[in-house]
Image (cartoon, rainbow, N blue to C red):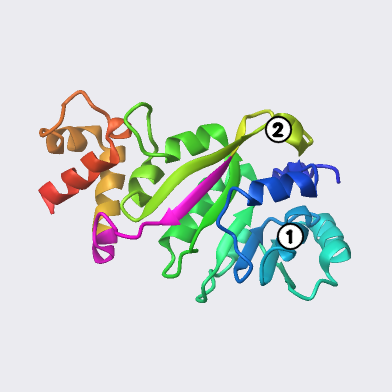
């Protein structure tokens, strides 16, 4: 299926690769799994053989027609013709496994980590650069989004993909990214808004951040703080 530039689509080459990637996830036979930006249904079709129900979400007309043709008859597949960004997260237990449009990566991660009912796990094929900045650590710069979700979610890269794994091949390096709720949160969920407001202000106002950051180093920027330092900073000012 040809790429539709408006939707930033890069399709995985085939079911064998999808099955390998799902093998790096915790998707199980009793799960309900959302395939966001399902395209022609390559991921959906493999998920349908491995879990209880698949909800395939797609809005692009050409891809949606292919999706219905390829997986519409599968009893455990529900096709939802809707924009991912406008999708209401379900209230029942669910997981996500998806090859999302790259330009929506931050939007989707934020959407499904801020909802009242986040997925039990979320596996996204995303740009390596985006994923690296989302994984907290002290050996590289991290993003504002990484700092925002870190107290409540773990993030790690499960597998690196090759450009030839896609059609058409993307111009950027890609990975399989895992986002999961923490078993024990680092900050109480009731304090989430206050914590995220602090992170946002620190990233937007370096002078404010420098005043708060005396316990560490005045030369540090927000993107250089570890997750542990963010939690400590919040506990200091709260």
**Residue 222 in the image: above or below residue 83:** above
Residue extending farthest to the right is 69
Depth order, front residue of 234/160:
160
Q: Secondary structure at mark 1?
A: helix
What percent of the width, then of the height, locates residue 34? 63, 63
Please, what secondary structure does the residue beneath circle 2 have?
Answer: loop
Q: Write down the quadrant of residue 51 in the picture.
A: bottom right
Q: Residue at x 65, y 46 (%)?
A: 21
- Left or right relative to 59: residue 2: right
Q: Earlier in the sequence, mark 1 or mark 2?
A: 1
Asked if residue 213 lies in the magenta stretch, the reply is no
Residue at the spot of label 1: 44
Numbered badge on residue 21: none
Q: Position of residue 175 (x, y in %)?
A: 59, 38
Which range of residues does the magenta coloring cover?
A: 176-192
Gap between marks 1 and 2 measured at Cα: 21 Å
Q: Disc 2 marks which residue? A: 170
């Amino acid at each position: 299926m040809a790429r539709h530039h408006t939707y930033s689509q890069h399709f995985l080459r085939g079911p064998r690769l999808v099955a390998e990637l799902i093998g790096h996830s915790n998707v199980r036979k009793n799960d309900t799994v959302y395939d966001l930006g399902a395209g022609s249904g390559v991921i959906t079709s493999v998920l349908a053989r491995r879990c209880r129900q698949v909800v395939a979400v797609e809005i692009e007309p050409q891809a949606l027609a292919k999706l219905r043709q390829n997986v519409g008859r599968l009893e455990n597949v529900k096709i939802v013709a809707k924009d991912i960004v406008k999708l209401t997260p379900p209230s029942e237990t669910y997981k996500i496994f998806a090859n999302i449009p790259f330009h929506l990566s931050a939007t989707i991660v934020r959407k499904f980590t801020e909802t009242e009912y986040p997925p039990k796990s979320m596996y996204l094929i995303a740009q390596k650069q985006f994923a690296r900045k989302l994984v907290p650590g002290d050996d590289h710069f991290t993003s504002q989004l990484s700092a925002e979700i870190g107290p409540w979610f773990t993030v790690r890269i499960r597998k690196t993909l090759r450009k030839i794994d896609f059609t058409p091949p993307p111009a950027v390096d890609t990975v399989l990214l895992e986002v999961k709720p923490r078993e024990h949160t680092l900050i109480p969920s009731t304090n989430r808004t206050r914590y995220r407001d602090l992170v946002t202000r620190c990233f937007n106002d370096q002078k404010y951040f420098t005043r708060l950051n005396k316990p560490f180093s005045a030369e540090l920027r927000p993107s250089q703080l570890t997750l542990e330092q963010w939690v400590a900073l919040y506990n200091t000012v709260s």
